[in-house]
Amino acid sequence: MSSRMAGAALLRHLGPRLFAAEPAVSGLAARGAIPAAARILPARMASTAAEAASAKQHGSAGGGTEKQEEAAGGQSKKAIVSYWGIEPPKLVKADGTEWRWPCFRPWDTYTSDTSIDVKKHHEPTTLPDKAAYLLVKSLRVPMDLFFQRRHASHALLLETVAAVPGMVGGMLLHLRSLRRFEHSGGWIRALLEEAENERMHLMTFLEVTQPRWWERALVLTAQGAFFNAYFVGYLLSPKFAHRVVGYLEEEAVHSYTEYLKDLEAGVIDNTPAPAIAIDYWRLPADAKLKDVVTVVRADEAHHRDVNHFASDIHYQGMKLKDTPAPLGYH
């Protein structure tokens, strides 16, 4: 008797939810495909189509408001408000004017040491050194034939390749440091600084000339081939890889020396220096293209010395992590 009474009470409470006619939750509910639990917990099992439509309607209304604001404000840019509370810093130069370069900051700028010996050469004595030297010399021949005296275009291709070794070496040393739980001696940062410096060379010469479509294709091919070759080479023999880069930088110094000769001879117009170069190397406001090529050549000479030094460390049976890296040594 008691069980019948309990069943009747339960039926009175759940009956309206289980059997009462209810607005269609979705197309599936109309066909009876949704179980009875949907009637017990309608908020959980209900379709979100109405909510999505409502959100879309609100979004379109908000978009219309944004468009009206944009139309009212002309082409003025609105500040980006971040959910994470991050706001881009407002930077100024030493003279109080606004900093215009998002690719580097005022504290990344420096004055290049142009007193460095640009004629220094590492004489190859061992078999690996001779192989590295011959490899680099063989790569220079087709480049000279292709670009001839088009120095700005040559510089564009040169910098797209020169920025690869520092990034590859720094990445592999970074992974080794993590894998072996050891310090790097500062070499990770030194090599990444080298890669960034070479990239800034590229950004500078993009203000001087623009690559043609076949030069872009050549860059794509050369960078892809060189990246993979250098990656494998650095895994097999870091000392050989650094020696190759040292000789590549020697050739870069030679290329920029030829560039300077044509600028001094009047073969190439000594145009005003790009604004990005003036800010990056802290050049005078009236600096010329010749001044830019001079500081770029000095940078390449520093990279030459750093990579030959790194190779010598390996040849002496030492490890990079045990020898402090020349940080800030552009």
Image (tube, rainbow, N blue to C red):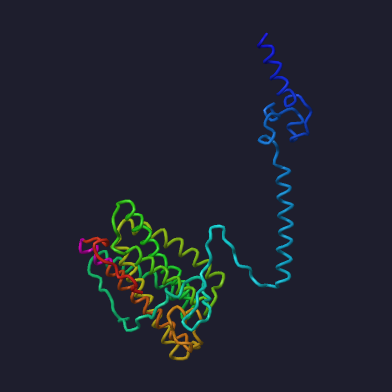
- Please identify the residue farthest to the top as the structure is shown: 1
From this viewpoint, is residue 255 visible? Answer: no
| Image coordinates for residue 112, horizontal then vertical, percent | 37, 80
Magenta stretch holds residue 115: no
Image height of 23 relative to 176, above or below: above
| Quadrant that contains the C terminus | bottom left
The majority secondary structure of the magenta stretch comes to helix
Quadrant of the rendered image containing residue 200: bottom left
Q: Position of residue 325 (x, y in %)?
A: 29, 67
Which residue is at the front of the view, 103 or 84? 84
Q: How many marks?
A: 0
Give coordinates of residue 138: x percent, y percent.
37, 69
Residue 212: in sight, yes or no?
Answer: yes
Q: Is 27 on the left-hand or right-hand side of 210?
A: right
Q: Tell me the residue at 50%/64% (across/down).
A: 220
Q: Is residue 220 left or right of residue 319?
A: right
Residue 187 quadrant? bottom left
Q: Is residue 22 left or right of residue 309?
A: right
Stretch in magenta: 310-317
The residue closer to the viewer here, 217 or 328, is 328
Q: Quadrant of the N terminus?
A: top right
